[in-house]
Structure formats: structure tokens, C-alpha cells
Amino acid sequence: MPILKYVDLYFKLVSAGIRAQFQYRFAFFMRIIGLITAYSGTAITMWVMLYRFQELGSWSFFEMLFLFAIAILSWGFCIILFFHFRSLDTYIINGTFDRFLVRPINPFFHFMAMKFDVASFGQFIFSILIFIWVSIELNIGWTIGKTLFLLASIIGGILIQGGMLVIISALAFWTTKSEQFYWVAMYPARNLTNYPLVIYPKIVQWFTAFVVPFGFVNYFPAAVILEKETPFFPAYIGYFSPLVGLVFFMIAYWIWMLGLSRYKSTGS
């Protein structure tokens, strides 16, 4: 199927999913309010931590908020596109995954397009407000170059986190389990991005740079924009964030397709 037809089909599937979600408007708006409240609570926790010491690993409160906002913005897009991948095991166990194999479209694309969580826009609202506030407080001079770099880095962050969800879901093809791995691997890795990597041991910093590259989600790009030092890493490493995201997602897609080639229906 030509790429343009895939794009058209994707938006048609997304449109249908959005209309279905708006059938429950109260739950939709409460989800948005809940997300904003939860992330605001995390920001307040940061403020409490830094109230006495002012800095954490040479990062001030507003610099950490900037770091946090980048992570939330990319995670918000990631949830919209890929969050349902963590529940692939449910489809496999129930035997409902088979329907993705009998239709004349790419199974990965079909599974990705089946859900579009618009309630996650609450994260965009929070992160945009934080961006505006922090930019004013830190006097960030937003040039065209910095803006384009930020957008490219956010795309890279989406691909890194989405790729991780895709890899986790692929494990279900071999083990019929995936959601448990989300809580064991993805959830702790995401929590690391709430704070600058410089506060963690060197081995953790290297792990999040070269194994599970969550450092490229927000830490390295933020260090470039804020002109912060990144001990143990070259100053220009943040510029590789978009490329790292693309390569990591391609690897994740390959693993998913490899798992699919070994998939055997449960017969449920």
C-alpha cells in the first residue's frame, strides 16, 4: 500500500477513535484534569526538594522544570501513538490479535492506529504552560535554530519512548506477557528522566545513553539549549537526539516484526 494511502487510512482510524472517546466526555475531561494535577504535584515536589538547597547537580529549579517539561511533552505524544502497545499480551491471550493478521495492511501499522488517546492532551497543556513560564524565568533566547532543534529532539524523544514500548510489547510474542515488563523496565526508566542524569552514578548515566537511551529524551537536548555541562559526555552529544530516536525505533520495529514472524495463535 502506498505511503499516502497509509496516512489517509491512519487519520480515518484516528478520527473514528476520537469520536468514540467523546461519547464519554466527563471521563475525557476528568482524565485531562487528572494528568495536569498529577504533573503539577511532581513539579511541587521538585520545588520542595530545592527550596533549601537551591540546586540539584548544578541544575536550578527552573532548569529542572524545563527538563521535566520536555519529558512530558514527548511522553504525551508517545502515549497517544504507542501506549496501548504495552497491552499487546491481552490481545494475544484472548486471540483477538489474529484479526490484525487477516486484513490487507501492515499489522504493526494497524495495531498502532487502532487507538488514539486524545485525553493525553492534558500533558501538552501542562508542558506548554511550563515552557512559557520557564522561558521567561531563564531568559531563554529562542532562535529559529533552537526552536527547530527542540522540535527535532521532541520527535527523537517520542521515538525513543515509543520504541521502548514497542520492544516491551514484542516480548508478548515469545512469552505472552508484556504489561508486566512495562512496570519493570519502562516505568523506572521514565522516572529517571524527571531529574538531570548528572545526579546518578556514572554507570546509570552510560546505561541511559548507550543501552536504553532515555538520556536523549530530555537531558542531553536540555543541556544543549540551556548550555549546561554534561560530565562524562561531550557537549555536542545532545545534537544526536533525533538520530538516536530514529535508529532506536527502527531497531524496535525490527524486533517487533521478528516476534510477529514467530507468533502462534493461542486459539482462544
Image: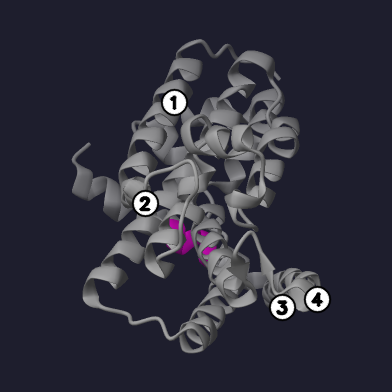
Percent position of residue 120, x then y: 59, 66
Percent position of residue 15, x then y: 44, 63
Q: Which amino acid does label 2 sit on?
A: Ala
Going from the N terminus, do you reach mark 4 or mark 3 first? 3
Going from the N terminus, do you reach mark 1 or mark 3 first? 3
Quarter of the image holding residue 72? Answer: bottom right
The answer to whether residue 101 is left or right of residue 106 is: right
Q: Name the residue under label 3.
A: 33
Residue that appears at 54% across and 86% down = 133
Instruction: Pick the quarter of the image with the N terminus.
Output: top left
Circles 1, 2 touching at the beta carbon (< 8 Å): no
Let me know if residue 175 appears in the view. Answer: yes
Q: In this view, does 34 lie above or below 99?
A: below
Q: Name the residue under label 2.
A: 235
Going from the N terminus, do you reach mark 3 or mark 2 first? 3
Residue that appears at 53% across and 34% down = 206
Going from the N terminus, do you reach mark 1 or mark 4 first? 4
Task: Tell me which segment is drawn in magenta.
Answer: 14-18
Q: Mark 1 points at which residue?
A: 102
The local crowd at label 1, few if under 14, some if 14 to 19, many if 20 or more residues have their Cα within 10 Å, is: few
Q: Which amino acid does label 1 sit on?
A: Val
Percent position of residue 216, x then y: 45, 48
Instruction: Pick the quarter of the image with the C terminus.
Output: top right
- Considering the numbered disc 3 on the image, is that residue within a helix, a strand or a loop? helix
